[in-house]
Amino acid sequence: MAEAPAKGDGAPPGSSATAGGSGGIAFFLALLRARPAYALGYVIVATVVVLAVLAPWVAPYNPVQASPVDFLKPPGWPHVMGTDATGMDIFSRVIYAPRIDLAIALAGTLISAVVGSALGAAAGYYEAQRGIGTFAAGFVMRAADVLQAFPVFVFAIAVVAVLGQSLQSVVIAVAFVNTPIYLRLMRGQVLSIRRMRYVEAAYIAGVSDFGIIRRHVIPNAMAPVLAQLSVNIGWAILLTAALSFIGAGVEAPTPEWGSMIAMGFQSIITGHWWPSIFPGLALAVTVFGFALIGSSVEVLADPARRRALAGELEARRRARLATA
Amino acid sequence: MALLTVQGLVQHFPVAGSRKVVAAVNSVSFDLEPGETLALVGESGSGKTTIGRCVLGLIRPTGGLIRYRDVEMGGRRTVRSPELRGKLQLVFQEPAESLDPRQRLYEQIDEPLRALGVNRADREKRVRAAAARVGLREAMLGLYPAEISMGLQQRVGIARAMISEPEIVVLDEPTSALDPTARAEIIDLLIRIQRDLGTAYLFISHDLSAVRQISHRVAVLYLGMIVEQGPAAKLFARPSHPYSVGLLSAVLLPNPTIRRESRISLAGEIPSPIDLPKACYLASRCPMVEERCRTRMPEVETVEPGHLVRCYRHEEVVRDGDAVDYFARFQAEAERILGAGMPPQVSTGQPMNESERGNVDHG
């Protein structure tokens, strides 16, 4: 993401790979130094992912093994986050949970981004043309209107209810509710990009519609989509957890933040706050991390903002050298 | 046969929320011969850009005929169809917007050749040749558009337009966004390319001094209609239509003490293209207006072969000697001010058609 991919087919051999000194990993690191909040986002997400991947080695207990003797133990040792009402270790479950939550959110968001962007690109490109294209584009957009007319959560519940409760249903529900977002985003981008002179130049030169969309429209429309993607993964995690919370998603005892909160919330009233609070915190921090990454991607993927930032970093570097 | 024939071209745009139309182009006819430059001049809104876009098939004309050699364009026959692909090209007014910000210059110049299905080795050779022709250094080909100046961006745009070896290039105000130095360089470059490759230009501009340098023939547009059309040198020296006189006399002179001798000056408002008069469009502004001008549109008359004008009183316009070649005055004045004289604009050893361009001395 740090550098626009050089199209090997067209790039002249030996051409420089940097755009105004704003390319590559060095620039990315400089950005993180200049904007610590972005760095925090990457640290949060990396931590969550690494812990989830290494969970079998890191987790002190089996996340699904109930131990009725140890139920509702407060945070302490050896249960750092305490245990829940069935005696399962909360810390182990919290670090296992992203395996489910992140996988569902990633899969659902990626499906919606690919499907939504493709449909949106086509809708935007063909909208202004005469004939069947306009009609089809209008139909797709009205369908998106209908989907978005429902509250996201209610709609997701309905999708799961129709498909039956399973992991795939949750993925499909996440994909379904997010698709219109990408559809609209991409369509708006395409509508403005297709009027650009470089698109007209390609059109006159005889580049096919598909070629124009692939070589000009999508690369130029991708910046907000990529930014949206990172933010959306956060939302998707939230939606997955919410579905599980009401019992429409992942079923207990599979470790999953939403269902953990649900399992724990009856105990809060009796003063046992830890079964709900720790998964809730993990959820909130993770979503926050993805939102920060989203902001950084927005900067990195937009050539103009990228150049402005490169200029700023360069100025800072000079200032530092001057004072040194 | 002419390379490009435009006959009775009409382009009306619907006005949103009404049944009226904006008559952007009203029955425009002209020919373009191989290797020549025809300039379309006129104020903003005169329909010159619209004509260029119709010729290239970017908009579908309301009526009229556009023929490239013996191919009638329209329907499925467009600049995009395989038999016409790459034969007609366009250079834009806005250099920055005409290049994809995410592609290296190399890829941008390469694009028309890809569309033609040229193999990779040939493409690479031709891209380098085209870049060299427009004065781009090889090292620049790996850069992105935002990293080079506007003048260089326009050179990339020209290289891209020329790489498919088109027979016709529509130049849509290629110089108006540039600073004076870059402007002069681009005009020189375009003249040189035409001399080397024999490309025909449809040069759309309101920059009259550029028009004078580059064009062989000029068509003056007013409210989507050609009011006068003829050889550049003649038209600049002795315009035959009151509107041409008015347009040419609007040139800035480098000496404010030179008075405008022309008795023809245009007053009043331009009629709205939504509600055009049935008679001569200039009637409301023309100092030489007569009764017939207000009742019936004058026919196109031939002053001499190749010089057409749409005015009842064109003979008087010429005879009264109102027309002053302000460009000749400009050049003389500039030379006087600069002392040493202006650098020669046309190099020696040019092919024959050079002498037909508008900027040769006459008198």
Image: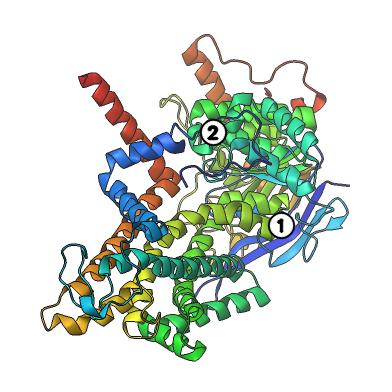
Front of the two marks 1 and 2: 2
Q: Position of residue B176 (x, y in %)?
A: 52, 39
Query: In front here: B15 or A36?
Result: A36
Q: Farthest front residue?
A: A69
For label 1, the crowd category at 10 Å Cα-Cα, with few meaning under 14, some 14 to 19 and many 20 or more, is: some
Pinpoint the chain carrying mark 2. Answer: A
Identify the residue at image location x=59%, y=52%.
Answer: A216
**Residue of label 2:** A17
Label ID, residue A166 = none
Q: Where is residue A169 in the image (x, y as percent from the top left)?
A: 49, 81
Identify the residue at image location x=42%, y=44%.
Answer: A304
Pinpoint the chain carrying mark 1. Answer: A
Q: Where is residue B233 in the image (x, y as percent from the top left)?
A: 69, 32
Q: Is residue B27 visible?
A: no
Q: Is mark 1 on a helix, strand or loop?
A: loop
Quarter occupied by residue A92? bottom left
| Residues flagged by tags 1 and 2 on a common chain | yes
Q: Would you place residue B193 above or below residue A284 in this image?
A: above
Quarter occupied by residue B99? top right
Query: In front here: B306 or A16?
Result: A16
Quarter occupied by residue A27? top left
Q: What element carries label 2?
A: loop
Q: Which amino acid does label 2 sit on?
A: Ala
**Residue of label 1:** A208
Q: Farthest left residue?
A: A271
Q: Which amino acid does label 1 sit on?
A: Ser
